[in-house]
Amino acid sequence: MTGRQVAASSLVAGMVFAAALAAAIPADADDTAPHRVRYSVSSTETAQAYIYYREVQPPNFGEYSHNPYQYSPKADVIIGPGQPWIFDTTLANPEDWAMVVVSLPAMHPAPGAPGFVCELRIDDVVVATDAGTKGALCSLRTW
């Protein structure tokens, strides 16, 4: 076999391997497929809480920065032991957009330590937790 024949043979073998590999990847393997996101917030004592969370993913950061509350509703709730606040949604890019933050309303006594506890799950995997007596933030992105 000549050098050209070896090179051509290697090229054909490489193309066959690449085609077989592409055929083996499922058609539904999409990087933008929605991910299941679960936010949960609880408290060591019964307490009033403001919870902001990302319900819908904005189309881009510019849209988000013009009206963040359009994408981050607020829940005004009472939480406590055995009485968590839980919200499920889907986001295409949770690593950029998933976020839940809990805060203590003004003039309300802070719960005892650890106080508020938040948890962020993506596709049933806990990816962030936080706790604090006046608030907590669970996110993969630094806000």
Image (tube, helix red, strand yellow):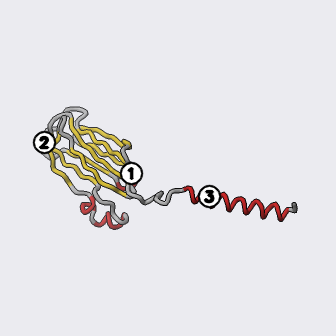
Q: Is residue 14 left or right of residue 125?
A: right
From the viewer's side, name the closer residue of 13 and 7.
Answer: 13
In this view, the residue farthest toward the right is 2
Q: Residue 49 appears at what percent x and percent y? A: 17, 45
In this view, the residue farthest toward the top is 113
Residue that carries the numbered disc 1 in the rendered image: 141
**Tag 3, which secondary structure?**
helix
Q: In this view, does 137 lie to the left or right of 21?
A: left
Label 2 and label 3: CA atoms lie apart by: 63 Å
- Tell me if residue 15 comes above or below residue 106 in the rendering: below
Residue name at image x 77 percent, y 61 percent: 9
**First in sequence: mark 2 vs mark 3:** 3
Label 1 and label 3: CA atoms lie apart by: 37 Å
Residue that carries the numbered disc 2 in the rendered image: 108
Q: Pointers 2 and 1 in contact (CB under 8 A)?
A: no
Instruction: Please rate how many residues cluster around mark 2, counting C-alpha atoms within 10 Å: few if below 14, some from 14 to 19, many from 20.
Output: few
Q: Residue 30 appears at what percent x and percent y? A: 46, 59
**Tag 2, which secondary structure?**
loop
Q: Residue 45 appears at what percent x and percent y? A: 17, 34
Residue name at image x 23 percent, y 32 percent: 113
Query: Dividing the image into 4 quarters, which one contains the N terminus?
Result: bottom right
Task: Residue type at mark 1: give it.
Answer: Arg
**Which label sits on residue 20?**
3
Q: Residue 37 appears at what percent x and percent y? A: 33, 50
**Which label sits on residue 24?**
none
From the viewer's side, name the closer residue of 28 and 96.
Answer: 28
Give the image quarter of residue 90.
bottom left
**First in sequence: mark 1 vs mark 3:** 3
